[in-house]
Image (cartoon, rainbow, N blue to C red):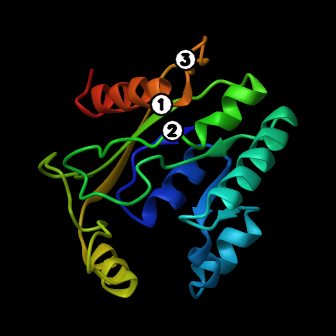
Amino acid sequence: MVANHISWLDIVVVHAARHCRFISKAGVRHWPVVGTLATGADTLYIERGSSRDAMRVVHQMKQSLVQGDVLAVFPEGTTGDGTLVLPFHGNLLQAAISADAPAQPVALQFTDASTGAVSFAPCYVGDDTLVRSVWRTLCARNVVAVVRFGVPQHALGRDRRVWAVDLHAAVQSMRAGH
């Protein structure tokens, strides 16, 4: 699964909608509570900025996909505020290409149930702290997570960069309600 990334809450929401293993930055392993839960869910951790570690994780991902695991990645590489989908990085898609596994686009959004407007309460962006984001989310009323699953697609000869652009377009389209 390939999804846009807004918040720490995305992991809970996606996991509730479809059991999967996540790929996460290594630092999450040391977060209080979240790190324990992520590790318990068999998350694969990657050291950002290390091409050697990226190759290791892509190999682990390929093996997991071949064994039938469902993996979830946030190819934006960071969180956004939910108004736009940031460009997708294609590096981790190499695992799906190598395993000849499909990628399913997943569009995430948080809305206010009473108005239908985008809710920024769960956002975890920039200088925000995890504690502040969690508190804001817990204090917000009527926040609804909207998860849209697109049609799984195979690479079909596309390299990871081209496929990333196509998956990005699919996620954007789903977020627009198409």
The disc, 2 or 1, on the residue closer to the chain's N-terminal end is: 2
Disc 2 on helix, strand or loop?
loop
Specify the amino acid type for callout 2: Gly
Which residue position is annotated with label 1?
Answer: 161
Which residue position is annotated with label 2?
Answer: 90
Which of the labelled discs sits on residue 158, or is there none? 3
Is residue 46 toward the left or the right of residue 4 in the image? right
The disc, 3 or 2, on the residue closer to the chain's N-terminal end is: 2
Is residue 140 toward the left or the right of residue 26 in the image? left
Q: Residue at x 35, y 57 (%)?
A: 6
Res 153 quadrant in image: top right
Where is residue 158? Give x, y as percent.
55, 17
**Along the viewing direction, whichever of 144 and 64 lies nearer the viewer:** 64
Q: Residue at x 28, y 60 (%)?
A: 143
- Mark 1, Cα crowd under 10 Å, few <14 / some 14-19 / many 20+, is some
Where is residue 105? Give x, y as percent.
48, 31
Specify the amino acid type for callout 3: Arg
